Image (cartoon, coloured by chain):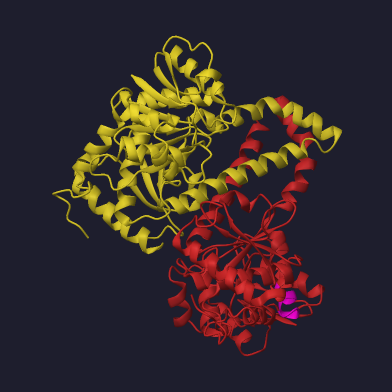
Chain colours: A yellow, B red
């Protein structure tokens, strides 16, 4: 199993990504690392460095940059996947660059309308997979239907949820509530699952609300990329704000300082549970191969996790299983048994 | 100044709402309280109880219930406002009932396309006004334009922000990013503010992301009711989840328990700052009179705050000021100086 990794774009520099690759290589994954060879010294066994100093990670228009710069590290990494030299893609250089390079080179999976970005939100207890968190700003009902299958396959293959409960993010739980997009998608999804009958790969729990990202009623929450991106950023912002307030409170008096010190070991377990590095980053679904996009702020631990997850996704054939589930349900694009709406 | 209050729908019962009304009456506000007189004993000076035992607070279809039940407490309260017996409306019986009864009886303000629900999110430091949090599931650009003026007027009149910074909630900060709705609304809003020239009642900070609900870059965040409702519920859910995790951590060992005890007084200040009761509830904007919708779970403190805010909004003519600002900017419906897009 070989994973192509773009080492450009990480806040801590390409050497930190290389260190993550080294950790993954110790666990048996082979890595093709695309980045500035001058900044990556003495790669360990299992990591092959391809000199690709040009980065489009900070480009304001990643789609254009990916087209214009075939020699950039992310495009080279995506091409390695497209040509079969690697079986999965990891890109620390931003979701825009990963999405553009992936679409142009790895290309959409057969029968998939469009890719989605999925994030396993580090909720205490069990992660909740939210998608799309921003691959497209708008979606049609048939996109949300496919996202449900894509997210469910991710949860069962990579997040150890055998039969995921899938919800549609909405502004109310009742059937008939929600935007027209949600109402139509819910009806279509119900129809698709009925078509799949006993082989339905997930349970549709219906509409869920914003509070259900943390309530535990769903393992996978499906929405358009606009709403998903807003929801994700709100969750991150509020979580950081509350934790900062607790930290500030623990510095507000000598008494509170002592309290904070005594509480620290217990809070550490929680912090580790909700540490996004533990989830490896966002998953780029709907291409012919799996992509993983660790956050640029990650340390080697997060990059290693991203590479390991990418390798596992390739090994367990996440893409093939997603396709099979979509096919059984008649939810592929131009599916012959698709009854339409 | 008289405030019409629907006492039905509160989790703690009508007597708790009445207790809140009594607190507000002590501060000089007169209250017309619509609810089951049998459950409200000996109203204090300044509170007049109108026997209206019928509640539509739990109705699954509030719009229909409001039309079908003119004798219900919320419809009677809204009628009191429409007929001039009161100058503002407070309803503990749910936003759906308040919105329906308000629309049918108090009616939309002249030139306003549709009402919006605004919430002052209790962010530490200074509240951030988010609207629409769920009055309508969908919006057109001209609605978002009006929401910006409505939210800015609320922030400057009731939340002590002299010149609010207004942002449009989006999935990216850059101009041109976002859904077509956001892109068009931003362009129209820029045009309106230019039309208002020196009299522009707020500063447009452009697109903001979900994380900016807590980052302090905007005082007012404008979005459609679907996205706003999701964002609000995500924020509430994540905040509760993190605080619960901190509480659980403080019960996980004797050492942590002691730490939690020492930290409690400092955390109390934070909890008070973010307590939604301190903000009185959601604001129903865009009607001929101001409405305030405290959360059903509130105690007398929250209901009293809601009534005091409603009275202050009426006293300071929030509705009239909103109208004047919309008029100056040519953003009224069928405004003669509207240049169109």
Q: How many marks?
A: 0
Horizontally, residue B188 falls left or right of residue B318, namely: left
| Helix, strand or loop for the magenta stretch, by majority | helix
> Is residue B81 placed above or below B136 in the rendered structure?
below
In the rendered image, residue B239, in percent from the top left (x then y), is placed at: 61, 46
In the rendered image, residue B121, in percent from the top left (x then y), is placed at: 65, 57
Q: Quadrant of residue B82?
A: bottom right
In the rendered image, residue A142, in percent from the top left (x then y), is placed at: 29, 53
Q: Which one is in front, A81 or B332?
A: A81
Residue B277 falls inside the magenta stretch:
no
Q: Which one is in front, A193 or B220?
A: B220
> Is residue A289 placed above or below A43 in the rendered structure?
below
In the rendered image, residue A205, in percent from the top left (x then y), is placed at: 36, 49
**Which residue in the rendered view is the most extreme toward the right?**
A254
Q: Residue at x 30, y 41 (%)?
A: A202
Q: Which region shows up in magenta?
A: B310-317
């Amino acid at each position: 199993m070989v994973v192509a990794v773009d080492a450009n774009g990480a806040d801590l520099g390409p050497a930190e990504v290389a260190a993550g690759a080294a950790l993954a290589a110790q666990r048996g994954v082979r890595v093709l690392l695309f980045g500035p060879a001058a900044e990556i010294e003495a790669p360990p066994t299992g990591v092959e460095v391809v000199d690709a100093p040009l980065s489009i990670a900070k480009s304001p228009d990643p789609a254009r940059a990916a087209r214009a710069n075939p020699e950039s590290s992310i495009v080279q990494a995506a091409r390695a996947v497209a040509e079969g030299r690697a079986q999965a893609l990891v890109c620390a250089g931003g979701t825009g660059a990963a999405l553009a390079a992936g679409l142009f080179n790895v290309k959409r999976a057969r029968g998939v309308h469009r890719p989605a970005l999925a994030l396993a939100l580090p909720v205490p207890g069990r992660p909740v997979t939210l998608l799309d968190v921003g691959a497209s700003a708008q979606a049609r009902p048939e996109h949300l239907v496919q996202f449900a299958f894509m997210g469910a396959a991710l949860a069962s293959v990579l997040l150890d949820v055998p039969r995921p409960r899938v919800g549609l993010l909405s502004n109310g739980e009742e059937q008939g509530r929600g935007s027209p997009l949600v109402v139509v998608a819910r009806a279509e999804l119900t129809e698709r699952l009925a078509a799949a009958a006993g082989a339905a790969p997930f349970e549709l729990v219906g509409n869920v609300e914003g509070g259900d990202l943390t309530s535990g009623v769903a393992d996978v929450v499906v929405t358009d990329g606009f709403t998903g991106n807003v929801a994700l950023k709100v969750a991150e912002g509020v979580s950081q704000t509350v934790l900062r307030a607790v930290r500030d409170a623990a510095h507000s008096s000598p008494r509170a300082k002592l309290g904070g010190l005594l509480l620290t070991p217990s809070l550490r377990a929680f912090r580790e549970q909700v540490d996004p590095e533990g989830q490896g980053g966002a998953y780029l679904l709907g291409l012919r191969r799996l992509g993983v996009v660790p956050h640029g702020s990650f340390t080697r631990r997060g990059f290693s996790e991203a590479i390991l997850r990418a390798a596992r996704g390739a090994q367990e054939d996440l893409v093939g299983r997603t396709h099979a589930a979509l096919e059984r349900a008649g939810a592929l694009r131009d599916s012959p048994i698709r009854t339409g709406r």
